[in-house]
Image: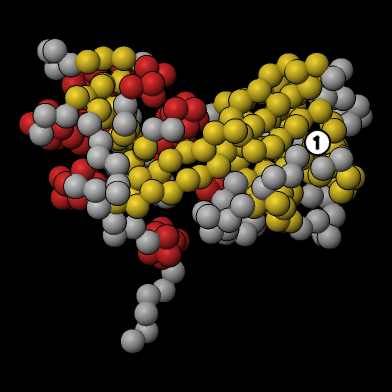
Amino acid sequence: MQERFKTIGLIGKPNHQGANESLRAIYDYLTSHQFRVLVEQRVALELDQDGAEVMDLVSIGKQADLAIVVGGDGNMLGAARVLSRFNVGVVGVNRGNLGFLTDIHPDNIETQLDDIFAGNYVTEQRFLLEVEVYRHDQLKSSNAAVNEAVVHHSEVAHMMEFEVHVDEQFVFSQRSDGLIIATPTGSTAYSLSGGGPILMPNLDALTLVPMFPHTLSSRPIVLDANSEIRLVISQDNTETLQVSCDGHVVLSVLPGDEIRIRKNPYTLRLIHPKSYNYFSVLRAKLGWGSKLY
């Protein structure tokens, strides 16, 4: 039997007219249906509703059964990195551009929320990456990534040198602009732009996608998601490098550092409307052809 949600977190894209319209409509819908609504602090400033329960993202994660994120995939990624720690169901309302993770259309909010609250929804678990930077074998920084970790130079169009090891086995050394390590969720994001493959979301796999490698033989490779990836940054690099998590969180990397990447212990619990179909999403977002007959 599907879980029935009672306490709802409302999270959104600040200072965006379309998102604000959807947030107000959802807040009115939820309160009129007697749900307990937990409003993210930034959203509360836009709603300006007396009596609203206002709290930060971590507090929402601890108390909510379901979080509704209004915005684009970037807003969903930011919320997901926090909410995944609490096993909260997360559903997205698309007020961005692509919307691979935010699949409720703003013109059809009430109907699809009616279905979800009636128990007519699909649950999907997406794994995250844990990204750690070590210096002289000491952990210096870490964060999580839903889509990808990208190791790159801090300057545009500068090459870097590094080695890649998978489960303590040497794979290759490379001179390139960097490397994308992507989850199946992230296979339709930056990795796709870099020539990486599209992975079905339920695959237990991840991809390594070289960024403008200085050899024609470098190609993307698909790995078991339970592998541990270790990147050793060459001492020959003379400047500061970076590893970016979902393009939002940037960790500093120095020559000689190691970057270790593996599965995060938490998963993101996505809630989709019953009509959700992954291939329909790909057709719509990537402009694929429809049936001929």
Look at the picture and state if 65 lies above or below 225. above
Lateral position of residue 61 relative to residue 127, left or right:
left
Q: Residue furthest bottom?
A: 293
Where's residue 99, x and y in %?
Answer: 38, 47
Look at the picture and state if 119 lies above or below 263. below
Residue 287, picture quadrant:
bottom left
Mark 1, secondary structure of its residue: strand
Q: Residues within 10 Å of mark 1 (few under 14, many from 20)?
A: many
Look at the picture and state if 39 lies above or below 179. above
Where's residue 196, x and y in %?
Answer: 64, 56
Residue 247, picture quadrant:
top right
| Amino acid type at mark 1 | Leu
Residue matched to label 1: 231
Residue 249, picture quadrant:
top right
Lateral position of residue 264 relative to residue 274, left or right:
right
In the image shown, does 163 or 287 lie closer to the viewer?
163
Q: Residue furthest front?
A: 1
